[in-house]
Every structure is written in structure tokens, then in C-alpha cells.
Amino acid sequence: MTFLQPITNRLSTLPPEWLIIICLTAVTFTIIWLLLNTFFIIKNHSWMKRLFGNTQKEDIKEILQEHIERVGVVQIKLNDLENLFTNLQKSSLKHVQKLGIIRFNPFDDTGSNQSFALAILDAENNGFVISALHGREKTRMYAKPVKNGKPDAYPFSKEEEDAIKQALQI
């Protein structure tokens, strides 16, 4: 007696309608199983295609070696970009970043606020202040250095201090 004989003996006692239902159920499950396997194989194949791209190499070792070389090149480029970014960040601290301007009237005998004080500062609050004093006969301009937002060599006028305060608020 073989392993399948007890099963076949029991199946032979069932009515034919039940045998048809059992066979159809087995065929349905088999088709569903095949469809699921096909779906996963196609999904896995597309993933492998994305992973390995259009490489013509047949050996997985060669394909992986090619990808490792590509990653190495990208890493070198990334390091170069990081260095460039760091250098740009450092140099940008010296660029003009803060401006403040105050218009005022320094003399009682002139018209409106035609004089001004202009503060030009970098990220570290270093720079200079330009003052232009407009009178009836002439306009005079002065430039004074600023170090850390404070006077470096010359005292500031009230308007110049206001211009620097305005620039520091930015």
C-alpha cells in the first residue's frame, strides 16, 4: 500500500460533484499561487534592473566592482564639494551683509535731510561708515573704520552710531 492509496480510496467514495469542486479549488489555488509568484519575480527583476542598471557584465562580482568604483568617484566629488562649500562659507563672512543708512540735516541754515551716514558691515560686524555732510557751499564726505560694531580709530557721530545700530539689527 502506497502513501496515496488511503487518500484515493476516500476520494473515490465522494460524489462526483464534490470531486469537481475539490479539483476546481485546487486549480484555483494553483493559479493564484502562480500569479503571485509571477508578480514577485517581475518585481524582483525590475528591482535588479534598477540596482545594476544597463551593465553588460554577466558576473555579479564585476557588476559590484563597477558600482564600487562609481561610488568611489562620487565620494571624491562629494568631498571636493564639501571643501568648496566650507571655503565659501568662510569667505562669505567677509562679504557685505549688513547695511544701515540714516538721513539727517547737520546744519540749521540748509533745507531738508540731504546728508547721510551709511554703515557697511560684514558678518563679524567689521566694515566702515561713510558720512556725507551736505551744506550750501559744498558736500564733505568722511569714512571711518568699524571693528566689531565699535569705533576703531575715530569717534562716531550720533548719526553714524544710529546707522551702525540699524545695520546690526539686520
Image (cartoon, rainbow, N blue to C red):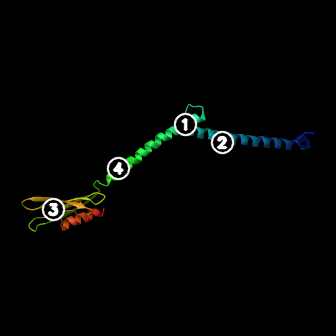
Q: Residue at x 55, y 37 (%)?
A: 65
Query: What mark, if any, has residue 65 been given in the picture?
Result: 1
Q: Earlier in the sequence, mark 3 or mark 4?
A: 4
**Mark 2 burial class by Cα count in 10 Å: few <14, some 14-19, many 20+:** few
Nearer the observer, disc 4 or disc 1?
A: 1
Nearer the observer, disc 3 or disc 1?
A: 1
Q: Earlier in the sequence, mark 4 or mark 1?
A: 1
80 left or right of 112 in image: right
Where does label 4 land, which residue?
A: 88
Nearer the observer, disc 3 or disc 4?
A: 4
> Of residues 77 and 113, which is closer to you in this image?
77
Q: Residue furthest left?
A: 137
Where does label 2 land, which residue?
A: 40
Q: Amino acid at mark 2?
A: Phe
Nearer the observer, disc 1 or disc 2?
A: 1
Q: Amino acid at mark 1?
A: Gln
Element under disc 2: helix
**Mark 4 vs 2: CB contact within 8 A:** no
78 left or right of 21 in image: left
Q: Residue 131 at what x, y percent from top left?
A: 17, 60
Where does label 3 land, which residue?
A: 115
Q: Residue 134 at what x, y percent from top left?
A: 12, 61
Q: Residue at x 47, y 40 (%)?
A: 73
Q: Residue furthest right?
A: 1
Q: Which quarter shows the N terminus?
A: top right
Q: Earlier in the sequence, mark 3 or mark 2?
A: 2
Number of numbered callouts drawn: 4
**Mark 3 vs 2: CB contact within 8 A:** no
